[in-house]
Amino acid sequence: MLIPAIAAAAVVGLLLLAYARFVEPSWLRIRYRRVSVRAWPIADGASGSPGLRILHISDLHVGRSTERIRRFISRAAAIPADIVVITGDFVDHPQYLSQLTGVLRPITGGERPVLAVMGNHDRFAYEKRLVRSNPHAYNSGELIETVRALGIDLLIDEVRTVPTRVGDVTFVGVDLRSHDAEGLARALGGHSGDGMVMLAHSPDALHAAVGANIGLLLCGHTHGGQVRIGPWLTPLTSTRTPIKPPSGLSVRGTTAMHVSPGLGVTFLPLRFFSRPEATLIEIIPHIP
């Protein structure tokens, strides 16, 4: 009885490994989420008119399965959004930078603005604790030039007001060194965070966002855990503090946060209970 049981367990294990390697990383989810944002400066429009729609993608990690990421971006480009945001980790390693333009081209060049921030892989900083990373030790100049040449508004500790069909929307984008309160204050440059949309790579920026009364924080970095033990246990999120859930929507104080599961993989070419995702977020005013 023992040998058949071991053989059966081995077969199941191999099937699960094959699923995590070949099926789930290629199984893109297009998800729609609706979030109410406190102090949202834009009132409801005409009856039946949707709120601001932001397409949130993250963690492409170009260089690992580049052709698959190109297909994902082509599908995401067809999603009807007012603004596209990319919250970092364009490339898995600087040697793959030459592949980035071809991957991003389907989502750029149109009328809708594309905003972005850099991730730790873009800064070539692989520490888990991003607040303590030292981006000045790495030269990301070529990546910055490549991304901006595509027409992407890459925010490096900057505030940007973007005109949209529902009115002007203000974003702040923070770099790795600015995931803490002092860095966010520097990026805001005296602007109030009330009702603002903040772009950061890691959810480690949440504490600073809450302190600044940011309306909505959009980030990535966790890959939704990438490899989870069922839907309940997430061994690794690469964040300073545990993130539960490791992706999706949550609210802390007056700040809503969306953590993207990302599109790509890193280190292990596996996903398990954490499908790649492009998320369309519709923002509506908060109703007390």
Image (tube, grey):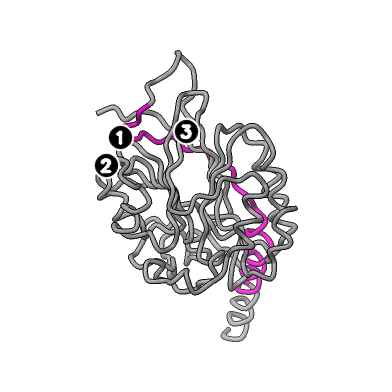
Kindly identify which residue carries mark 3.
Answer: 282
Q: Residue furthest bottom?
A: 3
Please provide percent x and percent y for residue 138. Answer: 53, 72
- How many labels sit on residues? 3
**Circle on res. 254:** 2
- Label 1 is placed on what type of residue? Arg
Compare residues 139 and 96 and report the one nearer the observer.
139
Kindly identify which residue carries mark 1.
Answer: 38
Q: Taking 238 as reference, is 152 left or right?
A: right
Labelled pair 2, 1 in contact (Cβ < 8 Å): yes
Mark 1: secondary structure? loop
Q: Taking 12 as reference, is 224 left or right?
A: left
Instruction: Tell me the CA gap for discs 2 and 1.
Output: 6 Å
Magenta-highlighted residues: 12-41
Q: Quadrant of the C terminus?
A: top left
Q: Is residue 170 above or below residue 266?
A: above
Please provide percent x and percent y for residue 259. Answer: 44, 52
Please provide percent x and percent y for residue 113. Answer: 58, 37
Q: Give whichever of discs 1 and 3 has the lower sequence position.
A: 1
Q: Is residue 30 magenta?
A: yes
- Label 3 is placed on what type of residue? Glu
| Crowdedness near tag 1: few (<14), some (14–19) or many (≥20) residues, C-alpha within 10 Å | many
- Label 2 is placed on what type of residue? Thr
Instruction: Tell me the CA gap for discs 2 and 3.
Output: 18 Å
Q: Taking 248 as reference, is 151 left or right?
A: right
Closer to viewer: mark 1 or mark 3? 1
Q: Give whichever of discs 2 and 3 has the lower sequence position.
A: 2
Mark 3: secondary structure? strand
Mark 2: secondary structure? loop
Residue 259 at least partly seen: yes
Q: Give whichever of discs 2 and 1 has the lower sequence position.
A: 1
